[in-house]
């Protein structure tokens, strides 16, 4: 049963990541936490996310907003060490409850058409929060998705820029975790088993991407965020 669940988690999350530019960590991390200890689950997510981002970056680089990418990366330098401290000292259930509530509140603001005006300072802040969430629970997606959706960033630019950012931040976060917390052979073995599922998801997700318009893209965003927020709350209760 655990093997079947692992297969479904990695395959579905890979399809979602490839078709929308986000979603692997949002979908995979909460469910991986049901199967493995927190550090193992988070590192599996980081390793496979690096593979996805690296595999896609060559085909989508033309749509990257390089100024936004630089600001997000600058912000992540601030957030990554904070996330390591959170992982070391904050109770995981408490952290998930806080993130679940934050996701639901911010998603509600998006649904009622709350909008954000992009500024360099806000770009850096979004990067900082994303960095902290990456190194603490392996989930950089929610703050970026909420921020960029609130600024009505086009789906191609959102997808490309976030994937480029993920490639950087996942790699740095994984190195930081290994250096401070350590890793295990089991983590890398499970990640190796997940690679064929990731590549299957890459193929299917790329096909799906071309069939999703901007309105459908926004609807999928809302559904994913609401389900993730509810799941984090219920799983931690």
Image: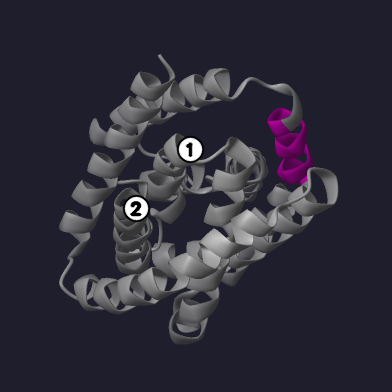
Q: Residue at x 34, y 52 (%)?
A: 9
Q: Is residue 164 left or right of residue 25?
A: right
Magenta residues, start to end: 78-87
User: Could you say where residue 231 lies in the image, as x and y percent from the top left?
Assistant: 33, 29
The residue indicated by pointer 1 is: 33
Q: Residue at x 45, y 25 (%)?
A: 102
Please state, as top left, top right, bottom left or bottom right, where the C terminus lies in the image.
top left
Residue 16, compared with residue 195, is above or below; it is above
Q: Is residue 40 left or right of residue 56?
A: right
The number of discs equals 2
- The disc label shown at residue 9, or none: 2
User: Could you say where residue 93 lies in the image, as x and y percent from the top left?
Assistant: 53, 21
Count residues near mark 2 (Cα–Cα under 10 Å), then give few for <14, some for 14-19, many for 20+.
many
User: Could you say where residue 194 lies in the image, as x and y percent from the top left?
Assistant: 45, 65
Query: Farthest front residue?
Result: 1
User: Could you say where residue 42 lies in the image, as x and y percent from the top left?
Assistant: 58, 46
- The disc label shown at residue 229, or none: none
Element on which disc 2 rests: helix
Query: Farthest top residue?
Result: 237
Residue 161 visible, this orientation: no
Q: Quadrant of residue 199?
A: bottom left
Q: Residue at x 60, y 67 (%)?
A: 167
Count residues near mark 1 (Cα–Cα under 10 Å), then give few for <14, some for 14-19, many for 20+.
some
Residue 232 visible, this orientation: yes
| First of labels 1, 2 by sequence position | 2
Residue 107, compared with residue 124, is above or below; it is above
| C-alpha span from label 1 to label 2 | 11 Å
The magenta stretch spans residue 237:
no
Q: Quadrant of residue 234?
A: top left
For the residues labelled 1 and 2, say whether their Cβ atoms are less than 8 Å apart.
Answer: no
């Amino acid at each position: 049963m655990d093997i079947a669940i692992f297969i479904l988690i990695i395959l579905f999350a890979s399809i979602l990541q490839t078709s929308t530019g986000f979603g692997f960590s949002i979908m995979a991390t909460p469910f991986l936490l049901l199967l493995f200890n927190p550090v193992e689950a988070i590192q599996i997510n980081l390793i496979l996310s690096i593979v996805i981002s690296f595999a896609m970056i060559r085909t989508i680089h033309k749509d990257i907003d390089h100024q936004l990418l630089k600001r997000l990366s600058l912000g992540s330098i601030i957030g990554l060490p904070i996330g390591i401290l959170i992982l070391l000292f904050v109770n995981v259930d408490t952290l998930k409850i806080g993130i679940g509530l934050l996701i639901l509140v911010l998603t509600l603001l998006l649904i009622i058409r709350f909008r954000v005006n992009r500024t360099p300072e806000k770009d850096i802040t979004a990067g900082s929060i994303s960095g902290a969430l990456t190194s603490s629970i392996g989930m950089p997606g929610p703050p970026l998705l909420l921020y960029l959706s609130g600024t009505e960033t086009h789906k191609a630019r959102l997808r490309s820029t976030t994937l480029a950012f993920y490639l950087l931040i996942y790699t740095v976060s994984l190195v930081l975790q290994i250096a401070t917390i350590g890793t295990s052979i089991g983590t890398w073995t499970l990640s190796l088993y997940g690679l064929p599922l990731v590549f299957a998801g890459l193929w299917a997700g790329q096909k799906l991407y071309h069939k999703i318009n901007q309105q459908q893209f926004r609807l999928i965003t809302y559904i994913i965020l609401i389900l993730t927020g509810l799941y984090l709350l219920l799983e931690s209760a």
